Image (cartoon, grey):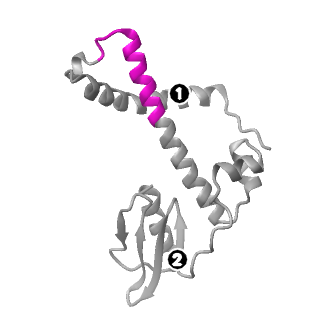
Amino acid sequence: MTTVEITPQERDELAKALLAALEPLAAGLRARATGLPVERMWNAEPVEVALSVLSAWKLVDAEVGRLAAVAAATAGSYGASYEQLGGAWGITRQGARKKWPQAVNRPAARPGSIELFGGSAELVEGEGGWRWAATGADGERGEAAAGHRSREEAAAHAGAFLAAHL
């Protein structure tokens, strides 16, 4: 089992980025819960404010779990084993199998298709080059506006679309 560690500087930078991302979410939750205008929504008992922030962290935790499952499924679609997934997450092979039961041994993608980030795309060669049509994990659909010179270029554009629609 691999232990993933970060430096103290990386931890500080991560904490700053997470707090910056959490602030608008916590403020929005607090504003909806209290009905107060933005300039007054944090005027409350400290325990109420702290519980609002804790609620926001719970939502972030759930979203991180969802995104981790998408990453595990993507790695599995490329052939990663449960041992590798567990190593990346710092848990055992059995722990990874329990956490992401559908991530490994998924059916192989059809020729001309890709599965990434919880979504899929079809690649088709025609007049004007390679085109793609994709459905992201969020249900959003997209397609190439113009043909691409190669299958790889079309796949790269489709992959960028899928990454943006988790």
Question: Dot 2, how many residues are within 10 Å of its Cα: few (below 14), some (14-19), or many (20+)?
Answer: some
Identified by mark 1, the residue type is Ala
Q: Name the residue carrying label 1.
A: 15
Identified by mark 2, the residue type is Ser
Whether label 2 touches label 1, CB < 8 Å: no
Q: Name the residue carrying label 2.
A: 113
Main structural element of the magenta stretch: helix, strand or loop?
A: helix
Residue drawn at x 47%, y 79% as measured from the top left: 123
Q: In front: 1, or 130?
A: 1
In percent of width and height, residue 117 lies at 52, 59
Question: Dot 1, how many residues are within 10 Å of its Cα: few (below 14), some (14-19), or many (20+)?
Answer: few
What segment is highlighted magenta in the picture? 42-59
In percent of width and height, residue 154 lies at 47, 74
Please say whether residue 49 is one of the residues in the magenta stretch.
yes
Please say whether residue 64 is one of the residues in the magenta stretch.
no
In percent of width and height, residue 115 lies at 54, 68
SS of the residue under disc 2: strand
